[in-house]
Image: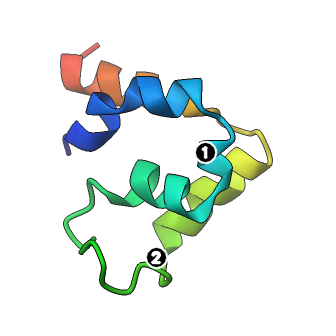
Amino acid sequence: MPFPNMLLNCRKFLGSPDYLKTQRGLTEFICRDCSFYKEGEDEDIACGGFYLIKLLLDKELVSVEEIVNAVRSDLSGA
């Protein structure tokens, strides 16, 4: 699955760690590329994937940089 929003905005996400501590920032980072995401509709309702990624980020088990790098390497076939 490509993640065009994540890759297009990766500098914003990597350079603004406080933004990703907000609901809006997390939604933009995690949800915007999902085919189930509809902007302006039920944005307060999150799926299990959202909560899992949020938990991993909150517990610092994974970083935004690691997620972005994993997406990049998956797309490049590395």
Say if 73 sits above or below 31 in the image.
above
In the picture, the quarter occupied by the N terminus is top left
Please, what is the three-letter code of the amino acid marked with disc 2? Cys
Question: Pointers 2 and 1 in contact (CB under 8 A)?
Answer: no
- Image quadrant of residue 55? bottom right
Question: Is any atom of residue 47 visible in this view?
Answer: yes
Question: Is any atom of residue 3 visible in this view?
Answer: no
Taking the spot 54% from the left edge, 26% from the top edge, the residue there is 14
CA separation in Å, label 2 and label 1:
20 Å
In the picture, the quarter occupied by the C terminus is top left
Say if 41 sits above or below 53 in the image.
below
Say if 42 sits above or below 5 in the image.
below
How many neighbours does mark 2 have within 10 angstroms: few (below 14), some (14-19), or many (20 or more)? few
Give the mark, 2 or 1, whose residue is nearer the N terminus: 1
Taking the spot 31% from the left edge, 57% from the top edge, the residue there is 32
In the rendered image, residue 34, in percent from the top left (x then y), is placed at 27, 61
Say if 26 sits above or below 68 in the image.
below
Indicate which disc residue 63 carries. Answer: none
Q: Circle 2 is placed at which residue position? A: 47
Indicate which disc residue 19 carries. Answer: 1
- Image quadrant of residue 10? top left
How many marks the image carries: the answer is 2
